[in-house]
Amino acid sequence: MNFSLWERTCPSECLLWDQCGGSSAAPCGCVWSEPGRRHQCHKCRVICRERKNLFRADGADDFLAHIEAGLPLDLLAIPSVPLPHQLPIFIPTRTNELSVGHRLSVKWVGADAKTLFTRHVNGPVDARPFLQSPDVVRTALRIADGTRILAVLNGRDGLLEGFWGMQRRAFFARLVLGGFSAVTGPTFSITSEERKPGSHNVCMLLRHHRVIEEIASTELAAIPNIYWRSTDDAGRWTEWLEANPNVRVVSRDFSRTKDKRAFGSEMAGLLAILNSVSRPFHVVLVGVGPRKARDAMVEVGATGHTCSVVTAYPVLVAIKQGREIVRRGKTGFEAVYSPERSRLDLAVRNIQTMEQYLCENAPPGATAGDLSSNWIDEPTRD
């Protein structure tokens, strides 16, 4: 790594040096140059070395408080909490958008952060009121009694910031009481260090690891979300996965990765980490549409791993737009406006079509066993 004159102080002066290893953004101070905006920490979410003591009664530096709240990856340990059922190739989310009274008869559904939290501006989120008992949860998510639930902690930065500020252990206890089975790690935003200091990104990763530890202390299966800011971080993931052989299922959130080239680069990085570990993994791919899902699934399967695709696309394109997913050949499709069908009918049909599309395009071995279908009782189609 090429250090600038300013970066030479990092190893001796920065508390995050062991986790960061140096950044082009160093020294990681206030990002605002205007005198009226500098050090207005109460208006800023960026975590830098110059943050002031906003919250701590002992007067300690708030930068230190952020570091202490997180957890280095090498200190994270996940006990063996196996998933109660093999994950299918496709898991729909936002099923709460379906008609009241409907019960989707599938093996797994996902509930994303928008479904799970009520957001407050610049403050902690609250858990949705329906998170109180298995019966109420299943009614709210429109699912059958036999359906297992995956909490998917992906969302926009403001929502995840509110999640970090809430009483998280109490929230996870509510998920246990509500009948949830597993939780994916949250994707606290990693941004370009040309715009934000490296200290912010490192603290976001420390947050993820702390949340995974909190999930793992419950009866829920914790599914770590594999993401990174540097090649050093990728190497840490390799070492950690080798040291934790009970971890067989990992996730990756692509909901904010819209650019095709960036998606390809991130997928290649993920597979490089997994392929450097001496065992196969099941990868939960979050927030990918049908086209990206197909390409990603082929890449994952080609390297000896299996995957599940988690997305709200089939449900939302039906409920919000009144569109049906129509196949065009083996690898093509389009969403066609279909006013003659109810939006509930469209959503169910779209879920079926999405699953069939993924199964037909999966490489050999990627859909072994229960990976082929998510339906308990598949509805008939005319």
Image: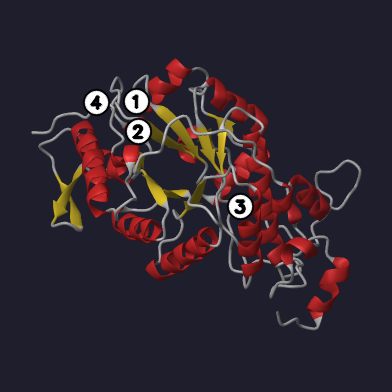
> Which label number is shown at residue 241?
3
User: In the picture, which quadrant includes the C terminus?
Assistant: top left
Specify whether residue 37 is in view.
no
Question: Mark 2–mark 1 contact, CB under 8 Å?
Answer: yes
In 3D space, how far apart are the residues under numbered discs 3 and 1 (Cα atoms)?
A: 36 Å
The amino acid type found where label 3 is placed reads Leu
Q: Are marks 3 and 4 in contact (CB under 8 Å)?
A: no
Q: Residues within 10 Å of mark 3 (few under 14, many from 20)?
A: many
Q: Nearer the viewer, residue 273 or 315?
A: 273
Instruction: Choose the circle earlier in sequence order: 3 or 1.
Output: 1
C-alpha span from label 1 to label 4: 14 Å
**Circle 2 sits on which residue?**
95
Q: Secondary structure at mark 1?
A: loop
SS at mark 2?
helix
Tag of residue 377: 4
What kind of residue is marked 2? Thr
Residue nearest the viewer, comparing 260 with 123: 260
Residue tagged 1: 142
Sequence-first disc among 3 and 4: 3
Q: Quadrant of residue 169?
A: top right
Is residue 265 in view from this perspective?
yes
Q: Residues within 10 Å of mark 2 (few under 14, many from 20)?
A: many
Residue 328, compared with residue 352, is above or below; it is: below
**Closer to the eye: label 3 or 4:** 3
Residue 95: image x %, image y %? 35, 33
Q: CA distance from mark 2 to mark 4?
A: 16 Å
Mark closest to the chain's N terminus, 2 or 4: 2
Q: Are marks 2 and 4 in contact (CB under 8 Å)?
A: no
Q: Residue at x 13, y 43 (%)?
A: 338
